[in-house]
Amino acid sequence: MIKIAVDAMGGDFAPKEQILGAMKAIREIPDIEITLYGDESAIKEYLTRSERIKIVQSEGTIDMGEKDPIRAIRSNRKSSMALSLSSVRNKDNDAVVSSGATQALIAGAHILVGRMKQFKRTAIAPVLPTASKKQFILLDSGGNLEIKPEFMVQQAYFASIYAQEVLGITDPKVGLINIGTEEGKGRELDNEAAKLFKENSNINFYGNVEPKLILDPPADIMISDGFTANIVMKTIEGTAKGMGTMLKQELSRGILGKLGLLLSVKNLKRFKKRMAPDEIGGAMIYGLKGVVIKAQGSSKANGFYNAIKQAAHVVRQDVIGKVNAIIESEAPTNEKQ
Amino acid sequence: MIKIAVDAMGGDFAPKEQILGAMKAIREIPDIEITLYGDESAIKEYLTRSERIKIVQSEGTIDMGEKDPIRAIRSNRKSSMALSLSSVRNKDNDAVVSSGATQALIAGAHILVGRMKQFKRTAIAPVLPTASKKQFILLDSGGNLEIKPEFMVQQAYFASIYAQEVLGITDPKVGLINIGTEEGKGRELDNEAAKLFKENSNINFYGNVEPKLILDPPADIMISDGFTANIVMKTIEGTAKGMGTMLKQELSRGILGKLGLLLSVKNLKRFKKRMAPDEIGGAMIYGLKGVVIKAQGSSKANGFYNAIKQAAHVVRQDVIGKVNAIIESEAPTNEKQ
């Protein structure tokens, strides 16, 4: 049995959607057990089954807009987020899924789960949809604003294993987010990272990729420093939102247009759903001793279910063990640096 | 009369669209004169008027994919791009408009037009559409990949004057592109820039803006270093393109859907046009001794006309003179640094 800790109190629609998602996961995935961390009486309002699912009472909560995430975790050791993270460290569970505040979850994961030995900088890596119906991994979406290129190499290992084992992509390609495709484009960081990726036999390096291909990228993994990749993610979000508004404004013009809009409602909903992150699941934090998945704060039951499914798959495929094997095989080289 | 130099040979559809755009500009804008730089026989195929418009013969061309832009300019001094830039330096013209290769144009502008005294780093600044039908300036979209915060302050002056005098925005707000809105978010560069913007009485600083508001920003000017802003611009382009593809895929599903699509064609075209940069005009290079406007490489006649109109307006409003006045008033402070 794969044991999953669910932070039932984190997220815009907690605990309801988290619990509905967890119950769906129990129904759909036969080899998992779930522990819900949160307020027992609030959870019981929505929880209608007990098979392979149990509750652990928590105390206090982590505010979504927490300004000092490290303090938030340290002073709320019995919050649902902290308890679920600690349960992975204690081996009570194999993975944790939370829709709670990203920065608090990253801080909490460092403090309560711990970093993999030799893995220098953790990364947070969402999986995004493309126009060609494939998926790609974007990293580091906010973990480390400034980073050394050799640490990006470790993150690329993790993403490659993840893409292969969890997304089922054979020999996944790594693309470096850059302002031009030619070799030598970009900042010093980009040039050094490109050089290291190219030389490394554990990475299938595609080369530089401009974000004007961001929704149909020629690589399966798109990597940059945490500042840049976060800016890319938020620009995708902002453009999608802005275009949605413009589309609504334009499509409702004229009588024929209004009729056309009416007939297109179903298709437009499907379009909206494709852009909605709820369909995709969560973002994994790479480089920890345990599996920590950040589900969207705005997750509904289905999105949260997808994040649990993803967590179970990461455990099943022993992603962390496989990454460890590569990193450890390189350890002597690392120490020489 | 405002005298505009047009590089007739640069761009995907040159010289045809450039000449059609120039002729439209002559028809619509009474106080301008245009000199077309290019191949006289090629130009004459499309040029059907001679009032306030003349031709200067050029030799050789700047390749659009030029890898060494400085050499491209130095070894093609009689190309249409080089001649039109030189004509501004020589005061034969007040402004130049070109759809030629961006990097070559920036390099050429430095060599042949020259930087404003005291203005440390030029910037390239497109004007982008928003969902609320306003516009905003994005800079620096590719001039300087790495930059000191004090040079970003000068660029913000230029953008503020431009927004006021050319876009007609009263007391334009400057937003710093960042990964969070709270003070202290981002890299060291972002924090230092925010501090300088806040202290400066010539800048109306709004604060940090996340790009998830990029198509409906609360500021009129969105600024970052050249790497980040270029990544933002290309991510907008890539998301718009990817969403367009997805929309097409989804809208044509089902019989009712197909009928809906048919009735919506006109509105969808209008939507596409709103996202098309051709409607917006060009990107100005800030910080030069003369007015240099980069029109999109893919400009059609109307887009190129808009860029000429914009160039004339920048001259008419004496944008460079006004920026110079601020920078010169600060010159002693700058020298102390």
Image (cartoon, coloured by chain):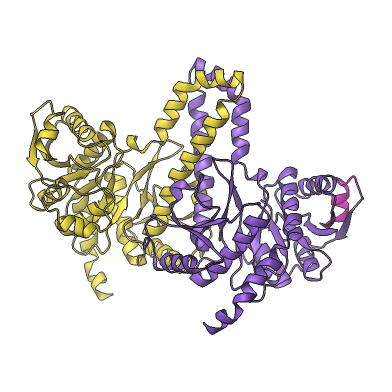
Chain colours: A yellow, B purple
Residue A218 visible to the viewer: no
In the rendered image, the vertical position of residue A177 relative to residue B72, given as above or below: above
Front residue of B77/A64: it is: A64
Q: Quadrant of residue A298?
A: top left
- x, y percentage for residue B298? 67, 47
In the rendered image, the vertical position of residue A76 relative to residue B95, given as above or below: above
- x, y percentage for residue A234? 42, 48
Q: Quadrant of the C terminus of chain A?
A: bottom left
- x, y percentage for residue B164? 64, 56
Residue at the extreme right? B50
Residue B250 visible to the viewer: yes
Residue at the extreme bottom? B336
- x, y percentage for residue B105? 68, 62
Front residue of B19/A133: it is: B19
Residue at 17% across, 27% down: A27
Residue at 43% across, 64% down: B190
Q: Magenta stretch containing residue A69, yes or no?
A: no
Horizontal arrangement in the rendering, residue A62 relative to residue A225 (left or right): left
Q: Quadrant of the N terminus of chain A?
A: top left
Report the span colored magenta: B35-49
Q: Magenta stretch containing residue B47, yes or no?
A: yes
